[in-house]
Image (tube, rainbow, N blue to C red):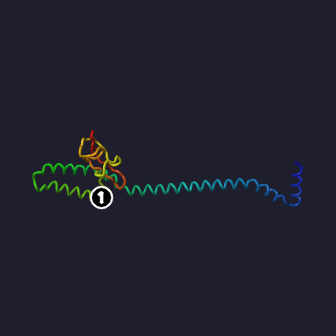
Amino acid sequence: MIEQPEKTHELLEEEGNTQELQESNTESKPSIDYQAKFKEAQDLYLRTHADFENAKKRLEKDKAMALEYAYEKIAHDLLPVIDALHAALESAQKEEETSKDRPISKGLELTLQKMHEVLAKHGIECVECVSGFDPNLHNAVIHVVAEHKEEGEIVEVLQKGYKYKERLLRPAMVSIAKNN
């Protein structure tokens, strides 16, 4: 068997076809390796490109969310100011119970009304407390006996809660009825 390839080789040399024999030997085996490597490289490219596109979409989404909720930190920082205005209004109303004009409480009411209009313009709204207790929107601070309310209903709002678009900035602090 060893002699036969030599004879074939000798015959091809005589005909001047040694170059064809070498080319046919080199083409058959390495071409399969190159094709596999090409498919591997192509698969790697497709996966890398898909990862890049996914990362690009994720960054665009994050950027859009950051722009959409850009006022959230400022809104959160304004909440104590609004609370102070509410407390000042309550105090002024108690002091001015006897007078008819009540100029301070009217001024504070107008200021609070304007503040809520500006906040609503930018997507900041008060959390509703009339529909019932919702643990996602309300923080029950105390239980009180309230015969005129059903158990678990909101009796009093101690501190208003606020939402910025769909996000909760601060839950409303409420007292809950307990009739035992």
Per the image, the residue denoted by label 1 is: 120
Where residue 38 appears, as percent x and y from the top left, is 66, 56
Residue 120, how many percent across, how many down?
Answer: 30, 58
Left or right: 81, with 92 as reference point:
right
Residue lying at the far top in this picture: please name it. Answer: 180
Q: Quadrant of the C terminus?
A: top left
Relative to 50, does residue 144 appear above or below in the rendering?
Answer: above
Residue at point 24%, 49% (across, down): 83
Name of the residue lying farthest toward the left: 99
Q: Amino acid at mark 1?
A: Ala
148 or 152, which lies in front?
148
Q: Position of residue 104 (x, y in %)?
A: 15, 54
Judging from the image, what secondary structure is the residue with disc 1 in?
helix
Which one is nearer the viewer's eye here, 164 or 12?
Answer: 164
With 30 as the anchor, is 77 left or right in this view?
Answer: left
Tell which of 5 and 118 is nearer to you. 118
